[in-house]
Image (cartoon, rainbow, N blue to C red):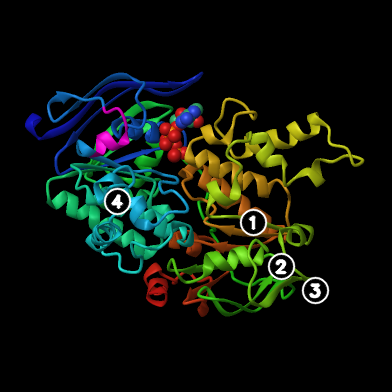
Amino acid sequence: MKEKIILEAIGIKKRFGETVALQGVDINLYRGEIRGLVGENGSGKSTFSSIIAGIQKSFKGELIYKGKPYLPSNMVEALQNGIGMIVQEKGTIQNVTVAENIFLGELNKYGRFGLLNKKELYNKANQALDNIGITNIRADDMIQNLNMQNRKLIEIAKVVFKNPDILVIDETSTALSYEGRQILYKIIEDFKSRDKSVVLISHDLDELIEKCDTLTVLRDGKLIKHLNKAEFEEDYIKQLLVGRELEGDYYRSDYNHEVSSEVVLKVENLNKENDLNGVNLDLHKGEILGIGGLSHCGMHTLGKVIFGFENAEEGHVSIQGTKIIDEKTAMKAGLGYVSKDRDHEALSLNSSIRENISIVGLDIIKKHNLIFSKHEKAYVKEQVDIFNIKAQSMEQYVSGLSGGNKQKVVFAKWMGRNSDILVLDCPTRGVDIGVKQAMYQLIIKLKNEGKSFILISEELSELTGLVDRLLIMKDGKITKEFFRDKELSESDIINYMI
Ligand SMILES: Nc1ncnc2c1ncn2[C@@H]1O[C@H](COP(=O)(O)OP(=O)(O)OP(=O)(O)O)[C@@H](O)[C@H]1O
């Protein structure tokens, strides 16, 4: 079996200042193996993968790749050596074309005398896109005009085009919708069939159980266990992840869809070029209204327009007769919004956890029109405790947090504000199962207290598990309405999405 090992990681340790991210992790990766890496937020998964992909150079321990000591000096060198990684967050740069993103760092190959041979560059880039079955994005598209899923697909096309021997996929599927995930799964299967290896990081246990051959569980930077396929059992994995049995309900246990007749938010005839095509909906008091669909269905734009973050060309959104024209009117009318695109839209990365959370809660923190530091800190501490945000202190910059902990900051920021209506766009993206459970239970508790939610999600189990009513969007229109029902299956929903 030893000859089938492609990468040996021996006693890998890594610190970030006082934070111990990895405490001596050993992993052998085999050729043709799909290995899942699983653990709570902040358990060290991204740190481990960034070490093997050349992003982190300073660490302790040893890497042996194809039988030789291995220490890439950067990501480009790792990729040239056959280890490619799709990172969890932003992996593309703005204001340049898709082609320039795909061949970043090697554009000199496509130029002579300082001139870029665009034809050749675009042909190659289109080839990289075609290679993984992407036909709706072309080489000359500008990155900033693409949505989050399409930007992720560019990254995937770029790495896969280099034909690496090891592909590391860090929490990528939650940035993708149904059709994007199918592309990713096809790539994973193709790698396996060609005796290449995949390291798949995910918080979606169903996905891991279905796609992986082996699983490695990390907790607080420690290796807890390697599992073979025969040992994959959901409750057992959950127990290994959190170090105890998860108790209580995960989703809603009732199947009642009756809600108050009082309409708290009205969407009337919204039209926006390419995205929204005559959207009407009523949200009721105490209702969790789900919205599902494929990546281009318009649901993410709808969330932005409802919160006034983007404007529609026609139609309007109103709360008790007040029209929502921008974020300010939205917040004044009691609306909150968790954006899917956390690094661009939801967080200020170079500010502290305290600043990020308190910024939208200032009117609550204020006493007699004054903001006292102790009130602000107490307010933020409450949110940090509720959502178990893992950080050195509330003064830590958000940029140094793990992906899931960033997401907890976004959620906490809006939950703490006690908004009457919340638009949640993929609110649990990248969050581990323990915290997801806490978020779901909080949403259910607030619903029972009369708060209303619009839950836009790409996780069908989240939609069927939580909502009173589900709207499916296709080509900017609402095409189907389902009510909460025990019999409602994910395949019923997919049929209306595609
Ligand atoms: N650049 C950094 N600066 C400071 N601390 C960091 C940095 N990167 C990671 N850490 C810390 O290292 C620990 C491990 O983080 P890592 O991102 O590896 O976790 P993870 O398991 O990938 O989490 P998630 O599921 O949330 O993505 C965390 O405590 C995190 O805050």
Q: Residues within 10 Å of mark 1 (few under 14, many from 20)?
A: many
Ranked by sequence position, the earlier of labels 4 and 1 is 4
Residue 488: horizontal and vertical position, in percent?
44, 71
Question: What type of secondary structure mainly makes up the magenta span?
Answer: helix
Would residue 254 be found to the left or right of residue 128 on screen?
A: right
Residue on which the image places disc 1: 337
Residue on which the image places disc 4: 158
How far apart are labels 2 and 4 at the CA level?
46 Å
Residue on which the image places disc 2: 285
Q: Secondary structure at mark 2?
A: loop
How far apart are labels 4 and 3 at the CA level?
48 Å
The quarter of the rendered structure image containing the N terminus is top left
Residue 278: horizontal and vertical position, in percent?
58, 81
Ranked by sequence position, the earlier of labels 1 and 2 is 2
How far apart are labels 1 and 3 at the CA level?
20 Å
Q: Residue at x 53, y 68 (%)?
A: 299
Q: Secondary structure at mark 3?
A: loop
Please state the extent of the stretch shown in magenta in the rendering. 72-79
Q: Residue at x 22, y 38 (%)?
A: 80
Residue on which the image places disc 3: 321
Residue 163: horizontal and vertical position, in percent?
19, 48
Amino acid found under the numbered disc labelled 3: Gly
Q: Residues within 10 Å of mark 3 (few under 14, many from 20)?
A: few
Q: Secondary structure at mark 4?
A: helix
- CB atoms of marks 4 and 1 within 8 Å: no
